[in-house]
Image (cartoon, rainbow, N blue to C red):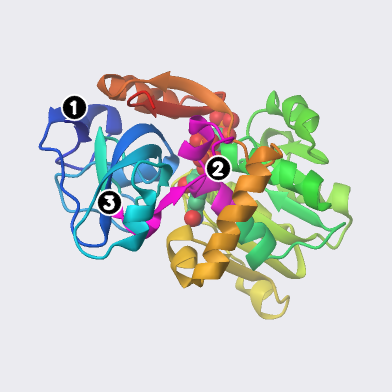
Amino acid sequence: MKAVVFDRFGEPAEVLRILDVPIPEPGPGQVRVRMIASPVNPSDLLVVRGLYGVLPTLPATPGFEGVGVVDKVGPGLNLLGRFALGKRVAVINSKGGDWAEYAVIPSRQARPFPDDIPDEQVASCFVNPATVLAMVRHVLAVPKGEWLLQSAAGSSLGRMIIKLGRHDGFKTINVVRRREAIDELKALGADEVVAASDGPIEEQVRRVVGPDGVKYALDPVGGDTGTALFRSLAAEGRLILYGTLSGEPVQIDSRLMIAGKRVVEGFWLGHWMPKQSIPAALGVFHEIANLIRAGVLATDRGTAFSLDAIGEAVREAEVVARQGKVLLKISER
Ligand SMILES: NC(=O)c1ccc[n+]([C@@H]2O[C@H](COP(=O)([O-])OP(=O)(O)OC[C@H]3O[C@@H](n4cnc5c(N)ncnc54)[C@H](OP(=O)(O)O)[C@@H]3O)[C@@H](O)[C@H]2O)c1
């Protein structure tokens, strides 16, 4: 089969290659999936650069999520695997490996999805949608009517948060690095959008929400932007750091944490999801399916590439002002 493989960490367009490798065999408790499609997410590219929290032994194949059809079940009882055989599933691959014609994953991570949800939505149904629900509804539990401040608001995930705000009744104040994104995000339902280039973010935020600042904030950028979001917090406000898009550290004024009771915490879906009970995890997937149908957690489709065009695909995924999520189209259903 064809697989995208890297044998050293580095710039994705330079180190990723297409190789012919043996089709993998599922072991006990596993299934094999014939892959249909898989998105290019920031976390996939961090892995290839050797900058992610957990790294594979090399050589490795990237790809944390995707969609495919279960074509073989590993030996043993494997009830979940047998149930999924022949079904179209979300391919949740916490070790990576979805950028290939076949992937082997634990049976419990092959999630059948209702037929009315299109393949391209199932391909991106986990990494961003589950993170949005976990951070906003479960960890911060943002109440109706409150402000939620977020940066990189034009990202796929940021757009989902804007739409979730409309759906759940909280207000969003959104930070973007390009002024051109302002009108687009307002049209999507953003209550306020501020551009980092228009002056100190914390001052712009307080002009909108009042002098106290915000109680809830989410930052995937770090550096000056993450620092400004921290400074935008009200007393007892909470900032979740969930990405490292700038590669720069956030500066924290300890006095604001000690006497001012501001809280900063990290979030990683890879830690949060395994802590959920089986019913709670099923509940998350049920919420996701309903909110994809409602358009709230739907992913905007970007350009699709074949596995052979992996170099172009990973370059396109990091173009400034790119529209929609880049998708690797691997086979027909
Ligand atoms: N912790 C977790 O468990 C978890 C789970 C899922 C996602 N994430 C993180 O969530 C973030 C968004 O993911 P995504 O898939 O939605 O990304 P995406 O669709 O690829 O969008 C990336 C966005 O980030 C903006 N951006 C990139 N570099 C930036 C910088 N240096 N400063 C400011 N803005 C910058 C881009 O702005 P332009 O529009 O101007 O180009 C774009 O809007 C990523 O950091 C990802 O790793 C974390």
Q: Earlier in the sequence, mark 3 or mark 1?
A: 1
Q: Nearer the viewer, residue 195 or 333?
A: 333
Q: Position of residue 136 (x, y in %)?
A: 67, 58
Amino acid bearing label 3: Val
Q: Which residue is mark 2?
A: 114
**Extreme residue in the bottom direction:** 259
Q: Which residue is mark 1?
A: 18
Start and end of the magenta stretch? 105-132
Check the image and report above or below for 232 versus 165. below
Question: Element type at marker 3?
Answer: strand
Residue at 48% x, 32% y is 119
Q: Earlier in the sequence, mark 2 or mark 1?
A: 1
Residue at 42% x, 43% y is 89
Q: CA distance from mark 2 to mark 3?
A: 19 Å
Question: Element type at marker 1?
Answer: strand
Horizontally, residue 32 falls left or right of residue 155, namely left
Question: Element type at marker 2?
Answer: loop
Q: Which residue is mark 3?
A: 31
Amino acid bearing label 2: Pro
